[in-house]
Each structure stands twice: as C-alpha cells, then as structure tokens.
Amino acid sequence: MTLLLSALAPIAIVIFYIYMKDKYEKEPKRLMIYCFLLGGIVSIFITTILYLFFDFFVPLTNQYSVIQQFVRAFFIVALSEEFSKYVIVRYYAQPKNAFNEPYDGIVYAVMVSMGFAAVENIFYVIEGGVSVALLRAFTAVPAHATFGILMGYYMGKAKFSNNRVKYNLLGLSLAILFHGAYDFFLFINFIPGISIGAFISLFVGIILARKAIKLHQVNSNFRTDKPIK
C-alpha cells in the first residue's frame, strides 16, 4: 500500500494543480476520469503494440551507439508514447461539447498523460521501491505532465481554429520533441555528465508549459474581464 501511494501521490498533485489552474470553467470530473483511465489502459496498450512493432522492424543491437539511442529516444519511445496519448485526446476528448475553451486541451491531455504515467510509475515503483518513487516524483512524472501540457496547448488552439490539423500535429510534434530530448540524454548516460541534458530539456519544457497555461487562462472563452481586442 505504501508503494502504491508513493507511486500515485505525485500523479494526484499534478492533476490537482492543473484542475485548479482551470480558473473560469471547470471540466466535468467524469470526463476527466475517463481520460485518465483511457490513458492508463488504451494508451499503454497502443504503446505496447508500437513497441513490439519497432522491436521487430527496427531492432537496436548496440546500447552504446549514440545514433541508435537517438532513434530509440525520438522515433520509438517518444513517438510511441506521445502518439498513444494523442489518439485519446484527438478522438475522444477533443470532439466533446465539454471541450469548450483552449485550456481544456491542457486539462484532457494532462489527464491522459497522468493515466499513462500512473501505470508506468506503479510498475517502476513496485520494482525499485520508495527511492525510485521519490526520484520519479521529481523527474518522470513532471516530464509526462510537461509533455501533456505542451501537446494540450496546441490541441486546445486546434479545437477553435480553421487549421485544426496543423495545430493538432504541432502539439504532437512538440511533445515528441521534448520527450525524445529528455530520454535521449538519459539513454546515452555512458557519456559522462551528459545526463544533465535531460534535466535542462525538462527545465525548458516546464518554463514553456507554465507560459502555455497562462496564455490559455488569459484567452479563456469564459473570462468575464477579458480585454476587448
């Protein structure tokens, strides 16, 4: 029970933070829960299928090859995981009537991401214990949240744009870019000191994510004091 709580506590904190940042029109809790569950079940399933596909068609044989680890980080792990989250947001959450302001893209993308992160975190923590839970609470969980916010920012713009495809794919691409960069520097940790790049990329991502939240708050459809343009 302690391990389970330690795995889920940072997930709950992220969800609460994003929910409270939705200042002007809260999302239905049922829909948020559905997105969370879909992230933990369907996204994990899609990711597993994609992993098996890549393992068969793009086998990586040299763990000390920078090029192979680049392919693994960006085109296998990041692409598989972020695409699996994107599918849920794009085809389940985005068409809903409750998705009625740009910030909702962030809410639902983060809920899907946290569902994914919850399942992933449970497996890692069961295997590694409380120390792993503590480490991931300040690294992997915020990373998944950041990727979700960056994706959701553009998917929120897409819902109310004539260029929906462009913004949706931009959100997916940005999540893949930051996820891939974060993983790549961790995967090539056989180069001394290179892992710091993962934390730098995460730090940059967090700064952009905070800016994304503020921008959608300012542009909320439900903001009563919204300045006239």
Image (cartoon, rainbow, N blue to C red):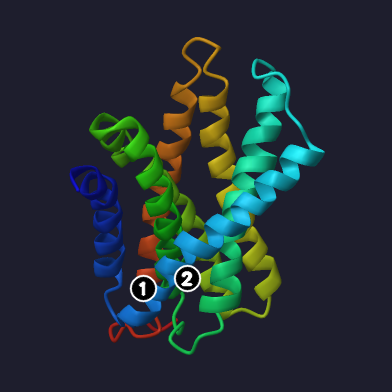
> Badge 1, how many Cα within 10 Å: few under 14, some, many 20+?
some
Taking depth in this image into account, of 132 and 167 the one nearest to the observer is 132
Residue 179 position within the rendered picture, expressed as x and y whole percent measured from the top left: 54, 43
Amino acid type at image mark 1: Ile
* Residue 198 - label: none
**In this view, which residue lies farthest toward the bottom?**
97
The residue positioned 67% from the left and 62% from the top of the image is 169
Residue 86 position within the rendered picture, expressed as x and y whole percent measured from the top left: 58, 63
Residue designated by label 2: 105
Residue 91 visible to an observer of this rendering:
yes
- Is residue 79 rendered to the left or right of residue 209? right
* Residue at disc 2, secondary structure: helix
The residue positioned 24% from the left and 55% from the top of the image is 13
Taking depth in this image into account, of 172 and 13 the one nearest to the observer is 13
**Relative to 117, is 163 above or below?**
below
The residue positioned 45% from the left and 44% from the top of the image is 205
Residue designated by label 1: 33
**Relative to 116, is 204 above or below?**
above
Q: Earlier in the sequence, mark 1 or mark 2?
A: 1
**Relative to 73, is 149 above or below?**
below
Residue 41 position within the rendered picture, expressed as x and y whole percent measured from the top left: 49, 62
The residue positioned 40% from the left and 84% from the top of the image is 221
- Is residue 79 rendered to the left or right of residue 117? right
> Badge 2, how many Cα within 10 Å: few under 14, some, many 20+?
many
- Is residue 21 rendered to the left or right of residue 194? left
Amino acid type at image mark 2: Gly
- Is residue 195 rendered to the left or right of residue 12? right
Q: Quadrant of the C terminus?
A: bottom left
Label 1 and label 2: CA atoms lie apart by: 15 Å
* Residue at disc 1, secondary structure: helix
**Foreground tag (1 vs 2):** 1
Residue 212 visible to an observer of this rendering:
no
